Image (cartoon, rainbow, N blue to C red):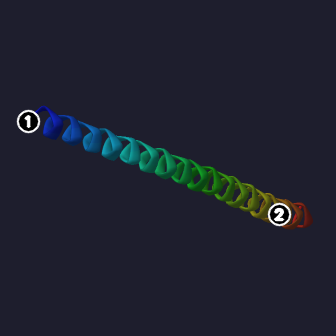
Amino acid sequence: MDEKILNLLTEMNKDLKNMKLEMTELKTEVNKDLKSLKIDMTEFKDEMHDRFDKIDAKLDGVGSQSN
């Protein structure tokens, strides 16, 4: 009986270690994806700011021509 309990506990411990490793790997993967997403969002935001700045400059140019 004690041997069965010991074997069961040993197996459970192995399973828990495997789960912990899988969770760590998943966390690492999610962190990489989040960093990549943040970079993409920053690049997109910068691109949009640049586009709006160009439009503002063109509108300023049009506005000064009519004065």
Q: Which mark is residue 12?
A: none
Vertical relation: 6 (above or below) 61: above
- Residue drawn at x 54%, y 54% is 29
Front one among 47 and 58: 47
Which picture quadrant has residue 1?
Answer: top left
Q: Could you tell me which secondary element the residue under label 2 belongs to?
A: helix
**Is residue 56 rendered to the left or right of residue 61?**
left
Q: Could you tell me which secondary element the residue under label 1 belongs to?
A: loop
- Residue drawn at x 45%, y 46% is 21
Disc 2 from disc 1: Cα separation: 79 Å
* First reached walking from the N terminus: tag 2 or tag 1: 1
User: Residue 46 location, x and y as percent?
Assistant: 75, 55
Which quadrant, please, contains the C terminus?
A: bottom right
Front one among 29 and 65: 29
Q: Which mark is residue 1?
A: 1
User: Residue 11 location, x and y as percent?
Assistant: 27, 44
User: Residue 50 location, x and y as percent?
Assistant: 79, 59
User: Residue 58 location, x and y as percent?
Assistant: 84, 66
Q: Residues within 10 Å of mark 1 (few under 14, many from 20)?
A: few
**Is residue 38 rendered to the left or right of residue 50?**
left
Which residue type does callout 2 highlight? Lys
- Residue drawn at x 28%, y 39% is 10
- Residue lying at the far left in this picture: please name it: 1
- Residue identifier under label 2: 54
**Is residue 29 rendered to the left or right of residue 18?**
right
Which residue type does callout 1 highlight? Met
Which picture quadrant has residue 60?
Answer: bottom right
Front one among 46 and 9: 9
